Image: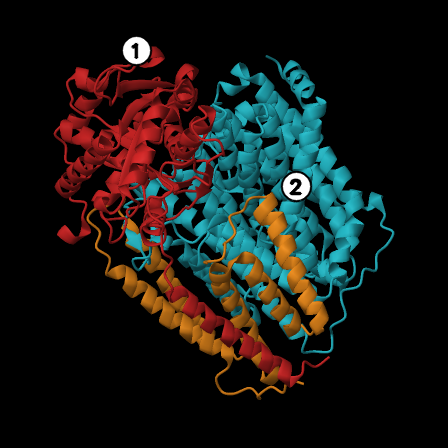
């Protein structure tokens, strides 16, 4: 029953040897083969959703994976992998640090990623650390209240906000500095109210925030249109304003924008992808070409509308510019709203 | 549409051969996923969701399979809790308290059978509740604002005191440590980073799965190692062969109470099965523990949490189907599944897509029955796990635990967290601290802080919001009842009984 | 076989409580230094951790000054060595997973663990090889859980 002495000794030796071996291995770098595979058919394509399954990033990855396969632009399915952590920061750092030359991987991103970059929440890296590939669709912010609320339009709400900021309780998904908070803060700013003086309650997700409006604990939800999709016909909510540049198409055309009601508040949530930083120019171009082909296909258009997204195709250098400009804009507003802890 | 028509339509969907088939497959995979330490319902559902989608299964079929996995896992979770003292998932934590002692006494078959039947009853009561009261319960869930949640969680903590009653200080320390672990990560209200030390891996906090696996599975390995040093290497015997099925009737009230509690708590989004089983267990202990048998292998202490967590699993479907809000981690993924199929759950689901809502509910009746039929004959097979020698069992547990963590976080960082928490858990166990309050503290801590701060943000800092609604007043009343009145009442009764004796 | 040192003036329960006391202090200091631009609730992100730290400190002190408990049997001698080896094996396994990939690391780790739990060489090695392959087949291949691949 007793373990004998030399067996323990042997175990110790093996362990030591293994860890030594491991150390040597880790110092060897793996040389990349650049550019060679750019034009040929690729297998093992992968989309990283930087979150747990089921969320917006998952949808973003499935959009491109299904559309690429459905339109026969690729022959083997693109895998969707999950890398939750730090609202996308883990994936961002992973791709830059570990897979900087992997030309087969794309990562889902959104306006929220740009907002986090602007607040320095992705660690040491900024928006120039990856190659921005394309945005394929967009969702829009909306201002939602309960159906029996006294506010009939945005002006009513803004008047209440101006007269007594305490009378309006925003219930939203996300903390101070999140997308939903930005929408509320921009609205407050448009009403001439200090964003620190408004009432704002953070919930775990858009669903919880909508319920709190229904339950009367909060009065306004600065939500996204896709979150409301199943509730539109229920008659339990009123949409006071859509935060798009102009009226949306189809069944959504009945909802007025904030702009046409006299308040220049817009919030588009683009859904896009980025590539690792050190891939070759040819590889980057391969992806850009694929995306350009993709957005023209019927399969893609169907996938897009099935997921409750609106057309918003910005590809390649145009998209890179948009992202970088947006991050810069966010940096300014973040500073203006007094969000950066180092400023105080 | 009235309920009967709705159900008939539902059963016509659920009883189609393909849907019966996938329900069985789902139930089976779910049982396995739940039974394997580290692999829980979330993994099962998350892994099979893309497969179901690629196979082009129609939405109702995919949903039936996925929810089969979901409640199958609630069945399976008890198996490793009872046999190995390692909960297969969070809701099976309470099952270890009396389940494992039963197995140690050689009553493993009885424990497995009783818990399977309790699970079945709990699950069935939940489905009946779902059918009859879904719309009504949806309004209850809406009324539950942050203030009410806060009161509910305080109440849950008050029942926690009952679970490990004789070591109040150590229980408190364990619960506090569990709560401290929840403060790691982005503060959900201000977005400030707490205790993250610049590690993006820590921004989202520490994953629940990592904590459960580390705390129970890894620490168990070290405890098992000690057994190799003493002469007691004899595997646990299985003494009970013939078990009287009718015995379950002795526990009918226990199971009924636990099911109702479980279902009600399961309906509330965000609390889920682990709270439900804790509350049900404590209530049973409060009512029935006259001779101090709870925690040492009392069948009621096993039946109650099992009935409750299965009932809660059913209850969690109420907010998901009627409001479009997930009530638990797994229903979040099921919700994602619906969205993938472009079905938006919500108030309109029952009228617009009755084949999905009805088919799902009907399949839960069928699935529950299947699970019972599947699980009772398997009792004998599962008890064989006890006969596996340690040198085979321990590596198995280790690899399963590792795969479990890798399936949610594919990083070495999270594996080290698992080991660190495991080692800490080992020290806690050696020092006679219970792990259950630690886990409950971890589950409830975040909800406690978030809801208190939400309530105060709504009221603008006024405390009285916490006591304004009737629901919260009832909960505060129950809390006071649990902490103060019941113990006093019981000691008076004890005194009277003793007087009567002498 | 494990001979245990007789109960000393300070027992391990108290040492642990002392450590928890120190941890409570550290935990509180960490959160006090946080810079919070603004919060919409009166409590903010600091109140809850501070409350926890205070409670932990109080309860730890109660343990430190409570009557001595039974001395806990800690692993000693051979068992201590084996516990350390077990911990090292587990840590090594986690590291090796990412260097040698799942299959190889699992084969080695399972073999070592089986040996630690007093299996015979043949049994250990065959258990190692079999579980490496079976677990990979079941979870990596069949269920598509992303298990680490070898670095090379």
C139 or B319: which is nearer to us?
A: C139
Q: Residue A36: percent from the left, percent from the top? A: 36, 44
Chain name for mark 2? B
Q: Colour of chain A?
A: red
Task: Please state the horizontal and vertical placement of residue A106, each as a whole percent of the image.
Answer: 37, 40
Position of B220 compared to C34: left or right? right
- Local packing at callout 2 (Cα closer than 10 Å; few below 14, some 14-19, many 20+) is many
Q: Could you confirm whether marks 1 and 2 are on the same chain?
A: no
Q: Which element is circle 2 on?
A: helix
Q: In this rendering, which labeled residue sits more in front, label 1 or label 2?
A: 2
- The chain whose colour is cyan is B
* A294 over A23 or under it: above or below: above
Residue extending farthest to the right is: B242
Q: Look at the image and tell me in which quarter the C terminus of chain B lies.
A: bottom right
Residue B459 in view, yes or no: no
Residue under numbered circle 2 = B29
Mark 1 → mark 2, Cα distance in angstroms: 47 Å
Q: Chain of mark 1?
A: A
Task: Name the residue at 45% across, 58% down.
Answer: C151
* Percent x, y of residue B172: 48, 62
Name the residue that disc number 1 marks: A254
Q: Which chain is orange?
A: C
């Amino acid at each position: 029953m007793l373990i004998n002495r030399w067996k323990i000794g042997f175990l110790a030796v093996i362990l030591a040897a293994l860890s030594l071996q491991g150390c040597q291995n880790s110092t060897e770098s793996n040389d990349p083969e650049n550019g060679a595979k750019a034009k040929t058919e690729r297998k093992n394509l992968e989309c990283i959703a930087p979150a747990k399954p089921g969320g917006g990033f998952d949808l973003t990855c499935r959009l491109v994976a299904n559309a690429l396969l459905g339109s026969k632009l690729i022959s083997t399915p693109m895998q969707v992998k999950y890398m939750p952590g730090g609202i996308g920061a883990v994936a961002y750092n992973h791709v830059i640090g570990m897979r900087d030359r992997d030309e087969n991987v794309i990562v889902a991103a959104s306006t929220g990623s740009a907002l986090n970059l602007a607040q320095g929440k992705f660690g040491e890296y900024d928006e120039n650390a990856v190659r921005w590939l394309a945005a394929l669709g967009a969702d829009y912010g909306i201002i939602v209240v309960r159906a029996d609320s006294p506010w009939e339009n945005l002006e009513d709400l803004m008047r209440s906000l101006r007269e007594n900021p305490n009378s309006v309780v925003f219930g939203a998904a996300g903390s101070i500095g999140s997308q939903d908070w930005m929408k509320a803060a921009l609205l407050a700013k448009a009403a001439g109210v200090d964003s620190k003086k408004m009432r704002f309650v953070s919930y775990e997700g858009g669903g919880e925030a909508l319920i709190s409006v229904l339950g009367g604990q909060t009065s306004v939800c600065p939500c996204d249109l896709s979150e409301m999709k199943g509730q539109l016909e229920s008659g339990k909510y009123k949409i006071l304003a859509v935060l798009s540049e102009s009226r949306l198409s189809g069944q959504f055309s009945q909802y007025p924008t904030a702009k046409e009601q006299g308040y220049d508040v817009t919030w588009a949530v683009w859904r896009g992808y980025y590539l690792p930083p050190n891939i070759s120019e040819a590889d980057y171009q391969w992806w850009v070409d694929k995306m350009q082909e993709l957005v023209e296909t019927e399969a893609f258009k169907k996938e897009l509308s099935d997921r409750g997204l609106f057309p918003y195709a910005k590809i390649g250098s145009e998209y890179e510019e948009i992202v970088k400009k947006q991050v810069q804009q966010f940096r300014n507003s973040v500073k203006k709203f007094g969000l950066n802890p180092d400023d105080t | 549409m009235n309920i009967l028509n709705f159900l008939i339509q539902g059963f016509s969907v659920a009883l189609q051969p393909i849907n019966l088939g996938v329900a069985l497959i789902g139930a089976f995979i779910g049982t396995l996923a739940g039974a394997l330490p580290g692999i829980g319902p979330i993994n099962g559902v998350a892994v099979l969701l893309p497969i179901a989608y690629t196979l082009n299964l129609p939405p109702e079929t995919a949903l039936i399979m996925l929810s089969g996995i979901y409640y199958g896992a609630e069945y399976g979770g008890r198996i490793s809790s009872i046999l190995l003292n390692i909960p297969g998932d969070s809701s099976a934590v309470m099952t270890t308290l009396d389940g494992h002692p039963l197995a140690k006494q050689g009553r493993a078959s009885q424990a497995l059978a009783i818990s399977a039947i309790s699970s079945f009853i709990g699950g069935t009561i939940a489905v009946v509740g779902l059918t009859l009261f879904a719309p009504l319960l949806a309004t209850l869930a809406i009324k539950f604002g942050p203030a009410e949640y806060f009161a509910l969680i305080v109440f849950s903590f008050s029942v926690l005191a009952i679970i490990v009653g004789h070591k109040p200080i150590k229980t408190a320390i364990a619960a506090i440590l569990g709560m401290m672990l929840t403060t790691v990560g982005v503060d959900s209200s201000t977005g400030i980073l707490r205790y993250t030390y610049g590690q993006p891996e820590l921004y989202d906090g520490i994953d629940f799965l990592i904590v459960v696996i580390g705390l129970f599975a890894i620490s168990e390995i070290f405890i098992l190692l000690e057994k190799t040093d003493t002469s007691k290497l004899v595997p646990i015997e299985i003494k009970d062969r013939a078990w009287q099925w009718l015995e379950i009737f002795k526990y009918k009230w226990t199971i009924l109470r636990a099911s109702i509690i479980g279902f009600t708590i399961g309906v509330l989004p965000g609390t889920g099965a682990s709270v439900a089983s804790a509350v049900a267990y404590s209530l049973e202990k409060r009512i029935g523990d006259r001779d101090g048998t709870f925690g040492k292998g009392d069948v009621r202490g096993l039946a109650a949490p099992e009935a409750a967590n299965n009932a809660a699993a059913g209850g969690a479907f109420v907010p998901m189907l009627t409001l479009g809000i997930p009530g638990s981690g797994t229903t979040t993924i099921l919700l994602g599944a619906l969205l993938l199929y472009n079905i938006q759950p919500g108030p309109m689901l029952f009228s617009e897509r009755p084949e999905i809502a009805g088919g799902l509910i009907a399949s839960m009746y069928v699935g529950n029955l299947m699970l019972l039929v599947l699980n009772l004959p398997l009792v004998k097979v599962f008890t064989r796990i006890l006969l596996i020698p340690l040198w085979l069992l321990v590596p198995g547990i280790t690899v399963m635990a590792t795969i479990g963590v890798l399936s949610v976080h594919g990083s070495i960082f999270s594996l080290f967290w698992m080991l660190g928490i495991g080692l800490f858990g080992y020290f806690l166990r050696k020092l006679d601290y219970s792990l259950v309050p630690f886990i409950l503290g971890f589950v409830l801590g975040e909800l406690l802080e978030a809801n208190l701060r939400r309530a105060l943000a709504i009221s603008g800092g006024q405390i009285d919001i916490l006591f304004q609604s009737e629901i919260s007043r009832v909960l505060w009343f129950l809390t006071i009842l649990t902490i103060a009145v019941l113990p006093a009442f019981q000691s008076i009764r004890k005194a009277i009984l003793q007087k009567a004796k002498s | 076989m494990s001979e245990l040192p007789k109960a000393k003036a300070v027992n391990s329960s108290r040492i642990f409580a002392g450590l928890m006391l120190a941890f409570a202090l550290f935990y509180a200091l960490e959160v006090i230094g946080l810079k919070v631009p603004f919060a919409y609730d009166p409590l903010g992100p600091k109140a809850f951790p501070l409350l926890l730290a205070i409670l932990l400190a109080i309860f730890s002190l109660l343990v430190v000054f409570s009557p001595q408990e039974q001395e806990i049997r800690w692993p000693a001698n051979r068992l201590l060595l084996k516990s350390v080896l077990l911990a090292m094996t587990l840590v090594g396994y986690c590291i090796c997973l990412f260097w040698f990939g799942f299959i190889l690391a699992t084969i080695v780790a399972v073999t070592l663990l089986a040996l630690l739990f007093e299996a015979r060489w043949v049994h250990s090695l065959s258990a190692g090889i079999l579980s490496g392959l079976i677990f990979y087949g079941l979870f990596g291949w069949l269920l598509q859980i992303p298990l680490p691949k070898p670095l090379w």
